[in-house]
């Protein structure tokens, strides 16, 4: 090879290397994502939205310096919103139709946003309220999150110095829960600052119970003057919670900025439904649990420094189902949906200088009540109208451009349009609920998660048995009035793999009531055991500002091993009865722990 050819080859090689380096530099670094979701914080619980009773400068910063979706919709209650947020699909498609007793469980086969990020090399963490399944394989760690600290059920009973779930273990914490969750999220961020991360922070405030540190409560109690002592205390607590959330959002923003990661971190802030009570809500009709505008329209802000032009407001309908496809595109993730998505990619509206209105579309809402799946109430929202259906042939139609407070029902003057909305809703419901099953079984026996607690609130109880706090048996409640041999406590279970299982009763009973004989059976297998160890606890001290609504208080609980039985793979009814009642009540029952041996 002559010298000229050699020089030419060297020149080509150098040019190729330079070109490659330039191309690599032009490829944007994969951005981090911090997705913040608050619980029961309404559209009107921000100073940005005209509430002059509180101050939320850090959340307002995300809205003012980022992009605000003016008409962003979620579901009327917690678990359905979370399922749609995590999957990009309407909640009924995912198996979720209510908030307790297993109806909040998201099908394990759903592909979550955490799994998508994880598949693309991201570290994933969830810090707060999960509420889409308390048992493996419904849990956060089974649904794509590397790290989880928080709680899995629908609410928590104590916000101070509490014990939280930490992956498959527990973690004792010190301080107020929102502060704790923020610090755990920041630890995750610091640990993974060299890797792209997806950090999901579903705070549980300002959901009840009414607990907040004095500093935040005192800002309002002497300032608000509603005229009703109870309302004044409740609102002071809730607004204090909101300002505490804002302080913690500020902590995260500042930490990201100090680490020099603002230009490669996408912030998303949103809430899960309308406000939990009557208070300022932007003059909309409805609150939590309602399919009217005020029950489902919430804040949603995107902030990405130097990438998304700040100060822009996007009109038109957007929703929780859009978050997944939007983040997938903004982060350049590889993802082929296995199930049809209901959401659309909104990234062009976020990145464009011109696009300020999403395309005309219909957003559907559904609100169930209890373990029986019902078609109504429901609603449809398009750019102009809100159609609300409260029952069979009971509906209303509102022109939202002229009547944003939904005061004038125009369905009678528009029969054809009303009939079309009604038919659209029925067709939608029938489609998205086709594969849903309301028979919920608690899975046990997975080797990945060998210990399962069958909680009292997921049992079926008969005769004179009752729940201590509320007739519905919300999370953390316990069973009382067990004083008859005819009383039965039953859990529907699904054994994932045959094996031997040990059963441990979680209970309270004083010494005077020991000696009862209980029987635990599944199929043709059963155990008899005399309850011999007394254990009794009073209600633990709490930090409630006002009488709690439905949440159970905390108690300490005793644990007594009942025995072991062999169970085959399959579905069973696991039944607990008393063969002998020693004296009065057998025990207060918090749960039955099942351990695969």
Image (spheres, rainbow, N blue to C red):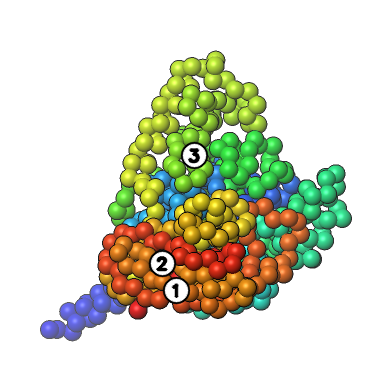
**Residue under circle 1?**
529
Residue 352 visible within the image: no
Mark 3, residues whose alpha carbon is within 10 Å: few (<14), some, or many (≥20)? many
Q: Residue 511: where, in percent of width, then height?
A: 62, 75
SS category of the residue bearing label 3:
strand
Q: Quadrant of residue 250?
A: bottom right
| Sequence-first tag of 2 and 3 | 3
Q: Quadrant of the C terminus?
A: bottom left
State if disc 1 and disc 2 touch (CB < 8 Å).
yes
**Residue under circle 3?**
365
Q: Residue 417: where, in percent of width, then height?
A: 47, 21
Is 298 in front, or is 141? Answer: 141
Kindly report the distance in space between the C-alpha atoms of the residues bearing marks 2 and 1.
8 Å
Is 111 in front, or is 378? Answer: 378
Q: Quadrant of residue 483?
A: bottom right
Left or right: where 480 falls relative to 122 = right
Mark 2, residues whose alpha carbon is within 10 Å: few (<14), some, or many (≥20)? many
SS category of the residue bearing label 1:
strand
**Residue under circle 2?**
520
């Amino acid at each position: 090879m002559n010298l000229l050819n050699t020089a030419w080859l060297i020149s080509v090689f150098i040019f190729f290397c330079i070109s490659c380096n330039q191309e690599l530099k032009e490829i944007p670094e994969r951005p981090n994502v911090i997705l913040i979701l608050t619980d029961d914080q309404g559209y009107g619980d921000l100073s940005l939205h005209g509430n002059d009773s509180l101050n939320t400068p850090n959340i307002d910063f995300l809205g003012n310096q980022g992009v605000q979706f003016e008409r962003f919709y979620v579901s009327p209650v917690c678990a359905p919103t979370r399922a749609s947020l995590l999957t990009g699909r309407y909640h009924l498609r995912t198996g979720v139709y209510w908030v307790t007793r297993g109806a909040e469980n998201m099908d394990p086969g759903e592909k979550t946003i955490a799994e998508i990020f994880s598949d693309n090399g991201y570290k994933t963490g969830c810090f707060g309220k999960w509420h889409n399944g308390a048992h493996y394989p419904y849990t956060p760690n089974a649904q794509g999150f590397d790290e989880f600290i928080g709680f899995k059920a629908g609410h928590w009973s104590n916000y101070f110095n509490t014990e939280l779930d930490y992956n498959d273990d527990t973690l004792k914490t010190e301080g107020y829960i929102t502060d704790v969750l923020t610090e755990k999220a920041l630890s995750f961020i610091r640990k993974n600052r060299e890797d792209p991360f997806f950090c999901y922070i579903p705070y549980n405030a300002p959901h009840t119970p009414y607990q907040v540190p004095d500093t935040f409560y005192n800002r309002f109690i002497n300032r608000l003057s509603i005229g009703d002592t109870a309302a004044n205390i409740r609102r002071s607590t809730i607004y204090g919670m909101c300002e505490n959330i804002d302080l913690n959002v500020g902590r995260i923003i500042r930490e990201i900025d100090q680490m020099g990661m603002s230009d490669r971190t996408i912030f998303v802030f949103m809430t899960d439904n309308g406000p939990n009570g009557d208070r300022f809500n932007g003059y909309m009709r409805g609150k939590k649990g309602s399919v009217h505008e005020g029950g489902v329209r919430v804040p949603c802000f995107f902030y990405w420094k130097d990438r998304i032009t700040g100060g822009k407001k996007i009109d038109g309908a957007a929703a929780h189902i859009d978050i997944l496809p939007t983040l997938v595109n903004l982060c350049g993730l590889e993802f082929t949906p296995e199930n049809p998505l209901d959401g659309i990619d909104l990234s062009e509206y976020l990145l464009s200088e011109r696009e300020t209105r999403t395309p005309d579309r219909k957003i559907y809402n559904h609100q169930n009540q209890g373990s029986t799946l019902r078609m109504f109430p429901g609603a449809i929202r398009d750019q102009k109208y809100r159609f609300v259906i409260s029952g069979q042939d009971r509906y209303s139609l509102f022109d939202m451009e002229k009547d944003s407070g939904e005061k004038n029902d125009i369905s009678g003057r528009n029969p054809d349009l009303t009939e079309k909305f009604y038919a659209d809703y029925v067709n939608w419901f029938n489609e998205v609920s086709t594969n849903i099953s309301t028979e919920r079984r608690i899975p046990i026996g997975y080797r990945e998660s060998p210990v399962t607690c069958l909680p009292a609130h997921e049992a079926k109880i008969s005769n004179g048995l009752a729940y201590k706090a509320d007739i519905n048996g919300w999370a953390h409640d316990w069973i009382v009035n067990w004083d008859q041999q005819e009383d039965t406590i039953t859990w529907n279970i699904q054994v994932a793999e045959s094996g031997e299982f040990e059963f441990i009763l979680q209970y309270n009973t004083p010494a005077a009531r020991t000696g009862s004989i209980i029987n635990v059976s599944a199929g043709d297998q059963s155990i008899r055991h005399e309850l011999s160890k007394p254990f009794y606890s009073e209600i633990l001290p709490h930090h409630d500002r006002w009488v709690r609504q439905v949440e159970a208080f905390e108690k300490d609980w005793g644990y007594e091993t009942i025995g072991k039985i062999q169970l085959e793979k399959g579905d069973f009814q696991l039944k607990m009865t008393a063969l002998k009642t020693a004296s009065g009540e057998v025990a207060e029952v918090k749960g039955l722990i099942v351990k695969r041996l």
